[in-house]
Image (spheres, rainbow, N blue to C red):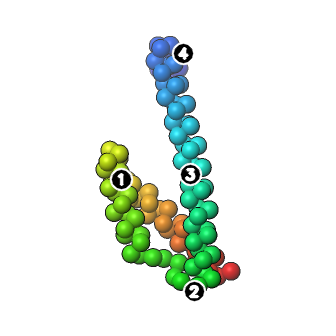
Amino acid sequence: MNNSEIDPAVQTELTRLRESIDNIDAAVVHMLAERFKCTQQVGRLKAEHDLPPADPAREARQIARLRTLAESARLDPGFAEKLLNFIIAEVIRHHETIARS
């Protein structure tokens, strides 16, 4: 079935939902950009004070916190944890780069 065979009401609803998804995706990207701006500042502060790029205790607290938030939002906590682990790995990579420079 191609788009010309879809009921017009269904196509309208599909388009509306996809536009909402596109808006949410844009917001997520902008929020991640803001988050990384903050973590870059953390990285510079850590480098200035010879602190390690990673903070396993904070990371564990953040993962537990995010899992709780995910549960309350009815989002799979395992998925939320994977996402945060991915972000944390990128932040640590940035911090290591900052520390070397």
Residue linked to disc 1 = 69
User: Which label's residue is closer to the chain start, 2 or 3?
Assistant: 3
The circle on residue 31 is 3
Label 1 SS: helix
Q: Amino acid at mark 2?
A: Asp
Label 1 Cα crowd, 10 Å radius (few <14 / some 14-19 / many 20+): some
Lateral position of residue 46 relative to residue 6, left or right: right
Q: Residue furthest right?
A: 101
Q: Is residue 57 above or below residue 11?
A: below
Q: Residue at horizontal 51%, vertical 82%? A: 52
Label 3 SS: helix
Q: Position of residue 11 (x, y in %)?
A: 50, 19
Q: Position of residue 59 (x, y in %)?
A: 41, 70
**Marks 2,1: beta carbons within 8 A:** no
Q: Quadrant of the C terminus?
A: bottom right
Q: Residue at horizontal 50%, vertical 62%? A: 87
Q: Position of residue 78 (x, y in %)?
A: 33, 55
Disc 1 to disc 3, how far (Cα)? 17 Å
Q: Amino acid at mark 3?
A: Met
User: Which label's residue is closer to the chain start, 2 or 1?
Assistant: 2
Disc 4 to disc 2, how far (Cα)? 62 Å
Residue linked to disc 2 = 50
User: Which label's residue is closer to the chain start, 1 or 3?
Assistant: 3
